[in-house]
Amino acid sequence: MNIDRRKFLLKALIVGALGTSIGTYDYNMLEGKSISVPLWFTIVVLISHFRIILLFWLAFENQIKAKKWLFAGFVGSLVYATLFWIFGEFISFETAKLLIILKQLIIGALSAVPVWVVLKVNYSKAHLWIIANAIGYALLEVYITNINFISSIGIISKVVHYSFLTLQFTLDGFWVIGYALFGLLLGVFVYKIIEDGVIESKSQI
């Protein structure tokens, strides 16, 4: 399958960044707050995660003809939201960072399974989707937990603390960069799946 690798990865990066702008604030809204309605918590996380799944489908639908992609994405998002809430009962924001990263690794892998079920029908390397999500969410957690450290570096610190606007703009920019890189990582793995792993099709997915 002939795919322009550069354009494909650029699209993945852009989609990752867009997923941030429409989803990240839901996470920020939850941080450090006591959630009295677990259902509300789950719905907010679900909406954020599913938006990103939807954007990836829009980016990749010309290469991955997945009629079941959106349904699989929804189920994966539901798994993600449910596990996020369950783990949240035991792992707080004050928990050891290594444990939080491990949590994201597990959630990322398990929530990718429904999409893997769809992809494996036609792609022999569909398992890379699970690996990509596990690594992606774990690395994203590492990145996010170190934003304060990054903000304290030299000239970046001066820009961040120059005014309220530069503080907000810079911190939001860090989120966008993080999710853009996450998108790029997924793009690299998805490119590998669709470029080298095609099975002789039994049915179009």
Image (cartoon, rainbow, N blue to C red):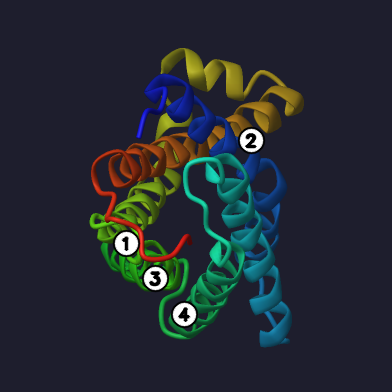
Could you say which quadrant of the image residue 87 lies in? bottom left
Residue corresponding to mark 3:
107
Q: Is residue 153 above or below residue 16?
A: above
Residue at (34%, 56%) from the top-left corner?
Answer: 129
Q: Which of the two discs, 2 and 4, labels the residue nearer the N terminus?
A: 4
The Cα atoms of the two marked residues, 1 and 3, are separated by 10 Å
Q: Which of the two discs, 1 and 4, labels the residue nearer the N terminus?
A: 4
Closer-to-camera residue (90/113) = 113
Residue at (39%, 64%) from the top-left corner?
Answer: 108
Element carrying mark 2: helix
Q: Which of the two discs, 3 and 4, labels the residue nearer the N terminus?
A: 4
Residue at (61%, 64%) from the top-left corner?
Answer: 70
Element carrying mark 3: helix
Marks 3,4: beta carbons within 8 A: yes
Query: What number is the disc on residue 172?
Result: 2
User: Residue extending furthest top?
Assistant: 155
- Which marked residue is nearer to the observer: mark 2 or mark 4? 4
The Cα atoms of the two marked residues, 1 and 2, are separated by 28 Å
Closer-to-camera residue (13/196) = 196
Q: Position of residue 59 (x, y in %)?
A: 58, 40
Query: What number is the disc on residue 130?
Result: 1
